[in-house]
Amino acid sequence: MNAWLDPSRPVPDVRTPLPGPVGQAVIDRDLAVTSRSLPRAYPLVPRRALGSVVEDADGNLFLDCNAGIAVTSTGHCHPRVVAAVTAQAADLLHYSASDFYLPVYSRMCAALAETAPIPGPVRVFLTNSGAEAVEGALKLARYATGRPQVISFFGAFHGRTYGAMTLTASKAKYHQGFGPLVPGVLHAPYAFNRVDPASGARSHDPEETFDYLENTLFRYQVPPSEVAAIFVEPVQGEGGYLVPPAAWLIRLRELCDRHGILLVADEVQSGMGRTGRMWAVEHSGVHPDVLISAKGLASGLPLGAFMARAPLMERWGAGAHGSTYGGSPVPCAAGLATLEVIESEGLLANAAARGEFLLDGLRELWRAHPDVITDVRGVGLMIGIEVRTPELAEAVQRRAFERGLLVLECGERSIRVSPPLVITAGQTATALKILAEVFGAVR
């Protein structure tokens, strides 16, 4: 263990007001020069991290249950990832894979293709981010089908670049002031779309999504023969960590097959083992035509990807899509190491076991605090806690931070719990203890 993480210190260990004096100086400098569009959640000033523990600039220790927004899949600074990055950086920092043949690029593509729940041969394009991967998948869907329209879901979050932002419909503020958006994007109701105003509980009418698609959207707005693809998050992320029934995804696949529409699974947040399977779509047995990945793909380095059935990606030729930095050597090395660690260290099984423990404990908290909590849902280490108001969600997030636990809001009034896949049994017990204190305090 690194010397800075003293085993005798409890985790979390908050010793100064938050932020501390060193952290406050960083924040002051930051606020004077950075874009005001950055939506900071709370005044965390990380200095270094290891596994599921983050140390801030003032020496306070935090238990990380947001993993840098579901990014540090193998934990912070996993030694095998760090070694792979160091070795690659010593050999070659960059050469563009768009114009030349990088050995590590094709190795990364091949390793990723082996994991894809897509039937037949798979081709892969590497990007710098999830939003870039979404943009590439959008281009591919239109190019390969010759159809102009695409469909996404209310509550979806696909990114902040223009095509990805247009597909996004989790909050109106993501569109505000940026019109006109990309044409040819329509939205439909997602699973769990109803909220009872009295109890705050969510419900799902399995017919609503498909009734809307078949009898409203396809009847009045666009014929299905004009639709290139349906983009779906197998578990909605920013929309509130909503887990649809497997039957809903199966029926969506059947609808796409019936109308010749591509099914695009956006697994930027739900993939790379977060749900206890490599890809969340695997829980339903559904095979997408295109699959999108990023966030946890390289344990913190900028790497995204979209994968597709080979015949689809073979329809476009040289120059139809490219990227100067996408799949650069160092992120690819981190990605290969990440895939190896997930497999060799049993992180899928750990995510499933630790997630089941957290869900059981959180449901006990729900029963203890029904006046605060209205729903607990999730799969693996992708868990959402819904509370009665947005103000309560903000209070829970902040008070957890003050006690040394890092969680994040999502949706309109939910808290996401998405720790690194290496989180231990003891750490999950600590997280539950802190959350119990927090929910008792915000009542």
Image (spheres, rainbow, N blue to C red):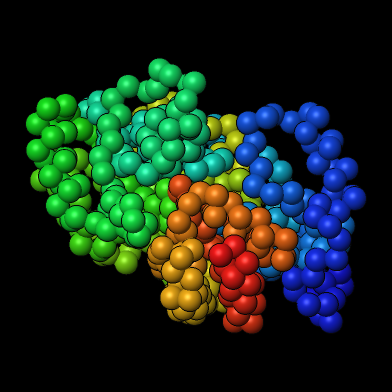
**Residue 272 seen from this side:** no
| Quarter placement of the C terminus | bottom right
**Residue 19 seen from this side:** yes
Which of the two residues, 38 or 127, is positioned nearer the viewer here?
A: 38
Q: Residue at x 64, y 82 (%)?
A: 426
- The image quarter containing residue 144 is top left
Which of the two residues, 213 or 440, is positioned nearer the viewer here?
A: 440
| Quarter placement of the N terminus | bottom right
| Number of marks in the rendered image | 0
Q: Residue at x 86, y 53 (%)?
A: 20
80 relative to 317, above or below:
below
Which of the two residues, 150 or 36, is positioned nearer the viewer here?
A: 36
112 relative to 187, above or below:
below
Q: Residue at x 52, y 59 (%)?
A: 416
Q: Position of residue 286 (x, y in %)?
A: 25, 59
Left or right: where does residue 117 sit relative to residue 2?
left
Q: Position of residue 364 (x, y in %)?
A: 46, 78
Q: Position of residue 432 (x, y in %)?
A: 58, 75
Q: Position of residue 250 (x, y in %)?
A: 20, 58
Q: Residue at x 59, y 59 (%)?
A: 396
Left or right: where does residue 327 sit relative to residue 413?
right
Which of the two residues, 85 or 103, is positioned nearer the viewer here?
A: 85
